Amino acid sequence: MRTEPAGEPPWWRRAVVYQVYPTSFADGDGDGWGDLAGIRSRLPYLQWLGVDAVWLSPIYPSPHADFGYDVADYCDVDARFGDLASFDALLEEAHARGIRVILDWVPNHTSDRHPWFLESRAARASTRRDWYIWRDGTRDGLPPNNWRSAFGGPAWTFDDRTAEWYLHLFLPEQPDLNWARAEVREAMHATLRFWLDRGVDGFRADVVHLIGKDPALPDQDASLGEVDRVAIHDDPRTHELLRGLRRVLDEYPGERMMVGEVNLRDTLRIATYYGAGDELHLAFNFLALEAGFDPAAWRTLVETVGEALVPRAWPTWVLSNHDNPRHRTRFGGSERRARAAAVLLLTLRGTPFLFQGEELGLEDAFVPPAARLDPGGRDGARAPLPWTPEPPHGWPAPPFLPFPPEPGGRSVERQRGRPGSTLLLYRGLLALRRRSAALRDGDLQLVDAPPEVLRFVRVAAGERLEVAVNFSPEPAALAGAEGSTIMLASDDLAPGQPFAGAVPPECAVVLSPSVPAQKRP
Ligand code: NOJ
């Protein structure tokens, strides 16, 4: 296992992490579904792009009621994706190429086909009965409390066999585990060790803020907002459970990490999930996913993150993932805006997470109602990646969902050879970040700017870079920046040239104050 040189920040503070959604990334066996062999065949692409780590959405055996977030066995690979041998081969080759691998890990619930649940539901007297959360309903035959499932409807299903209700904060096919039971904690720790022993670099822990629950299961305040209403969020019991997970990771050498999906909309609360450096290494902050192309929202977020996390904890940044419309789609389909936002994402202080295909400037696919597969209506963002210009775009067989718009022109192959393409912009950004201590490690200071511009400097020993994002459809003057060197721009401005003083409309620039070298006459 590799370790960083002493004194260096841990790898996950400097990494750019790329989310692979295995179903729609690349198909190795020609069945129209992505798989591990497909991912492995595209590792040279990810290395060329310059990512440091990949996060694989769930690959475990699953009935796929929620696309793998319903796990039937935590210690194996779904036959759709391959097997343990193909996983080991992928991991080995990724490591050989300098790419770390983190796995999605789903602690809040299993599949209803998991042997633990089958045993639990078989009888009230089953030894595993309270590995899940079973309760009587009310005297009127209603569910035990008013909790709602994230996919709609009550968070409880009545099971005729034993005449009790079981809790599922997501689908009925995803019963919640009872983390109050020591045996459940031990069994789930063992699933982490199974993959840590195989050499994975860490985990993305699915809705990990939900694992601690008040055993009294009190009704929720019906006046709570949408996110809070779906479940009891932010229960203090979760923090002790996270410390337990952290201890498991700490048993291993090599800076194994856990990034938690903490699906709250409050940066101060999210910050508590890092504990005193003894809980999560990183926590997602989905406020960035919802900020829109809006300078005020971003300014507030950058300020809040600065106050709530720094210097104690390390932020994360994300624009797109498999649960939300792609950011280009959210920004009205504008590639210019999506590119400006990419510069922002990759120059902020913190670990950026990319979602497969955002580097191609993809928009969501239109999926006709009859072809929709996901219970949460998220198929559009999960459409297959186009690799080559001609149909079926590098897939050996037509894939399970339609491609996003303009798959030929936006394919990897086409964009690799097109100067100024969004793919080459991302590659340039990743390369700039890799060689810039200021961007990777440096402090961030916001600079006064007109309201339509977000302007900040990143500073590390001996290096200072300035970033300005102009969110408006008009050019924006940048006081005092004239003559600095353009390191990179999302559009219009050529790198290496002196900055003339205005940021083009809906454009982001990275500037270096150093005076460009004079050409000898
Ligand atoms: C969050 C995952 O990202 C999402 O895809 C899934 O449906 C829920 N958690 C339930 O596991």
Image: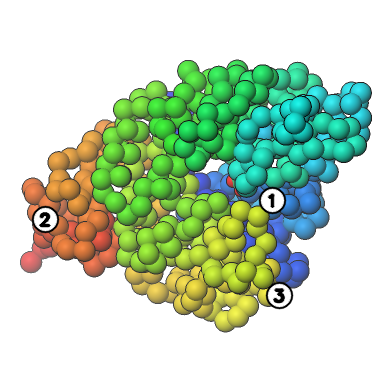
Q: Which residue is mark 3?
A: 397
Q: Residue at x 29, y 51 (%)?
A: 294
Residue name at image x 77 percent, y 33 percent: 141
Q: Secondary structure at mark 2?
A: strand
Which class describes the residues within 10 Å of circle 1: few (<14), some (14-19), or many (20+)? some
Residue hosting label 2: 477
Answer with mark 1 or mark 2, whichever residue precedes in sequence: 1
Q: Is residue 105 visible?
A: no
Q: Nearer the viewer, residue 170 or 216?
A: 216
Residue 66 badge? 1
Using the rendered view, name the quadrant where residue 446 is placed. Answer: top left
Q: Residues within 10 Å of mark 2 (few under 14, many from 20)?
A: some
What amino acid type is highlighted by mark number 3?
Ala
Label 3 crowding class (10 Å Cα cut-off): few <14, some 14-19, many 20+? some
Ligand 1, image quadrant it occupies: top right
- For mark 3, give the secondary structure: loop
Q: Quadrant of residue 382?
A: bottom right
Q: Could one spot residue 337 in this view of the protein?
A: yes
Q: Check whether the beta carbons of the residues at disc 1 and disc 2 lie within 8 A of each other.
A: no
Some atom of ligand 1 lies within 8 Å of the CB belonging to the residue at label 1: yes
Tag nearer the camera, 1 or 3: 1
Q: Position of residue 54 (x, y in %)?
A: 57, 48
